Image: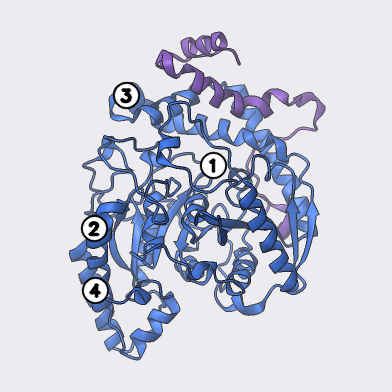
Amino acid sequence: MTLEELRDRMKAARVEIAENRLEVVRRLLTDALRPILAMDSRAHRTLEPAVTFDTVRSRGDHGQ
Amino acid sequence: MASEELFYATIRDIGARFRRRALSPVELTRAHLERIEHLDPKLHAFVTVTADRALADAKAAEAALGRGDISSPLLGIPVGYKDIYATRGILTTGGSALLADWIPDEDSTCVTRLQRAGGVMLGKLITHEFAFGIQFPGHRFPAARNPWDLERMPGGSSSGSGAALAAGMAFGALGSDTGGSIRGPASLCGIAGLKPTYGRCSRAGVLTLSWTLDHTGPMARTVEDCAYLLQALAGYDAADPASSREPVPDYVAPLGRGVRGLRVGVPREYFFEGIDPEVEKGFEQALATLRQLGAAVEDVQIPSIQSAGAFMAIMLAEAFAYHERDLREHPERFGELLRERLLAGALITGSEYVQAQRIRTRLQADMSAVLRRVDVLATPTSPKPAPTFTAVYDPDYGFPRGNTGPFNMTGLPALAVPCGFTTSGLPISIQITGRPFDETTVLRVGHTYEQATDWHKRHPI
């Protein structure tokens, strides 16, 4: 993420961050988004971020 | 002042002294209040010391013991609560100027449960601002200091909990853990800390940082003490939407069963990146000890582990959603660092948040697959020992990469246990992670390792 992209996002989100802190925020967001931007969602089977309601599940099978 | 040994005894030992009338809860509580008065001006672990309440709790415990009530191992045990747990009639600040005068009308569920179990409330323990920021010099609430080196951080965000326990100012504490806030301070302060399975312990009445990542749990000086605390805390709570109805087993009785035959998986990828050589050495020695104790230790692969950093996108977005109104209306009431971290969450798109949750689902599936082949995972808890305040206060200091966040993503139970010291005397820690709701095995591995070593017997003061 470039600083210009960061500023675009700030404008869209209507938030202000001090100019001298933009680089720190840019690094934080870059790290957070790296795995997301690296993910080609078309290459994976559907992974739905949904809760499930199985009443019987084996111990090793459920995440939360 | 009572002897140092008293302040570092275990909960089991204190209970035995109570029962044979060698010590009373009131004596123990008075000794702790004196110790806090003596040590805390330098450590800043407590925001509020509830001396009157502590003595009232202790007297009630003493009366119960006098009636022959020995039903709870926590009866008369002095404890402290992280200051994001609501406490009825007692200041609850969240480490924030925004809540500097907030006095809740009700206790959080975890506080209720520990009090019902006979805990003696010593007071409220400082937290990083809203469990996410850092108190810089001049903040309304001073930052807790690490008892092993006052110039270093005790970790966070359960910073006061870690410092108080390491300094012998309480026998147990409540922490909360969104990305490692129980295990990080446990690691940097040389104590034990358990992040239970998501849904195991209630979050009702606890200030939110990130709904889908927040966990509550116990911190103590030994694994057994964590088990005693967990026993009182665990169980369904209708007031927490994520609370589980999974039955609560006995966490204490199985601790002595050893690790012979258990399979310990070590994921080498991700968890060793940027690791301090002394931390790595201490961790490898801990693995050798587990092998000597009869565990089968093997390397394992978690295919999607490199995507675990998406954890931060989830946390930032959810934290912004929680704080947005206050941020827009009262930005000046947030510390500068916390404000910019929260505002970063506003810059994550809806699509990115959803993709992060999809990554999370994949990571959960991968860890479940690995945990069908091994009983627990072992990793270093923190890649580095406690940083100095000078380093953390540097304007360019970023958000440190940790080894704990992946287990907030997956909701799995994870325990930090001391496993050594650096040559400069700073604690090192091993993290044991298990299957959902299998805290029993996690605690058993940690306890067996702990009892074979003497790291937990070293104290800074």
Using the image, determine if residue B421 lies above or below residue B403: below
Disc marking residue B49: 2
Of B265 and B195, nearer the camera is: B265
Amino acid at pointer 4: Met
- Identify residue for label 1: B212
Picture quarter with the N terminus of chain A: top right
**Subunit of label 3:** B
Q: Nearer the viewer, mark 2 or mark 3?
A: 2
Location of residue B1 (image quadrant): bottom left
- Identify residue for label 3: B331
Amino acid at pointer 1: Thr
Amino acid at pointer 3: Pro
Amino acid at pointer 2: Val
Q: Contact, CB < 8 Å: mark 1 with mark 2? A: no
Name the outermost residue toward the bottom.
B20
- Can you see residue B46? no
Looking at the rendered structure, the secondary structure element under dot 3 is helix
Q: CA distance from mark 3 to mark 4?
A: 45 Å
Pointers 2 and 4 within a single chain: yes
Q: CA distance from mark 2 to mark 4?
A: 18 Å
User: Which badge, 2 or 4, is on the more N-terminal residue?
Assistant: 4
Q: Contact, CB < 8 Å: mark 2 with mark 3? A: no
Q: Nearer the viewer, mark 1 or mark 2?
A: 2
Q: Colour of chain A?
A: purple
User: Which badge, 3 or 1, is on the more N-terminal residue?
Assistant: 1
**Subunit of label 4:** B
Pointers 1 and 2 within a single chain: yes
At horizontal 67% and vertical 76% (from top left) the residue drawn is B258
Looking at the rendered structure, the secondary structure element under dot 2 is strand
What x and y, as percent, mark residue A50?
64, 38
